[in-house]
Image: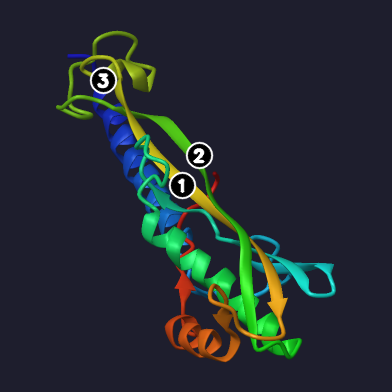
Amino acid sequence: MNDRCPPMRRWLVATGIGLLAVLAAGCTETRRPPVAAMVPQSTNGVFGYSDKMLAPDLYEVTYVSPRLHATPASDDAHGLEGEKQRVYEMALWRAAQLAQEKNYPAFEVQHESRDVDVTVRHEPVYYAPPPLFFGGCHWDCDWPFGYWPYPYDYTYRTSAAGQIIVKLTVKMLPQATATSFDTAATNERLRKAYASATFALTQADY
């Protein structure tokens, strides 16, 4: 048996353990505490609500979510149907807030869009078949690669993240109609539902 193999094998084991520790630390660093959902987008530049006046009684209200865990499936919602509804209602809440600020008792959503922008990633995942680090010294024992019992193999890991964008065109009304929202009632209902809503920011690098 080649005398140089055992020291190199020990070096490989130590290096592997160090690499696993670094990877574990990296995973820990990506976990961040939940953040409040009902915030102006201007506070972070990533997610939240925004609005602009199109006319004295007409506004465009937008809510953009952060990137959320999604499924690579081909359906329109990509597993985010529930989040789409939540984002819509937070946009609607902002519309009710605007109506209250402008002293309108009612408002109407004249147009809406609910879009999901999904990014799907296919990343190679490399692994070495067992026995790991304990194969024979197949070729040049001065190099770590000589200690693998056979070459690297790999598979693919598929992950997806989606960003939801809701836009509402909102008409402020001096009095209620059959299709309008009551400003005070809508504000109260959505405040109770979403005042403490949060997003868990666990997705990165999409």
Q: Report the front residue among 202 and 74.
A: 74
- On the image, the x and y values in percent for residue 109 come to 61, 67
Q: Pointer 1: what residue? A: 161
**Is residue 27 depicted above or below 179 in this figure?**
above
The secondary structure type at the circle numbered 1 is strand
Res 168 → quadrant:
bottom right
Q: Dot 1, crowdedness within 10 Å: few (<14), some or many (≥20)?
A: many
Q: Pointer 3: what residue? A: 148
Q: Dot 3, crowdedness within 10 Å: few (<14), some or many (≥20)?
A: many
Report the amino acid beneath label 1.
Answer: Ala
The secondary structure type at the circle numbered 3 is loop
**Is residue 65 depicted above or below 49 in this figure?**
above
In the displayed orientation, state which residue is furthest to the front: 178
Report the amino acid beneath label 2.
Answer: Thr
Task: State if disc 1 and disc 2 touch (CB < 8 Å).
Answer: yes
- On the image, the x and y values in percent for residue 105 come to 65, 89
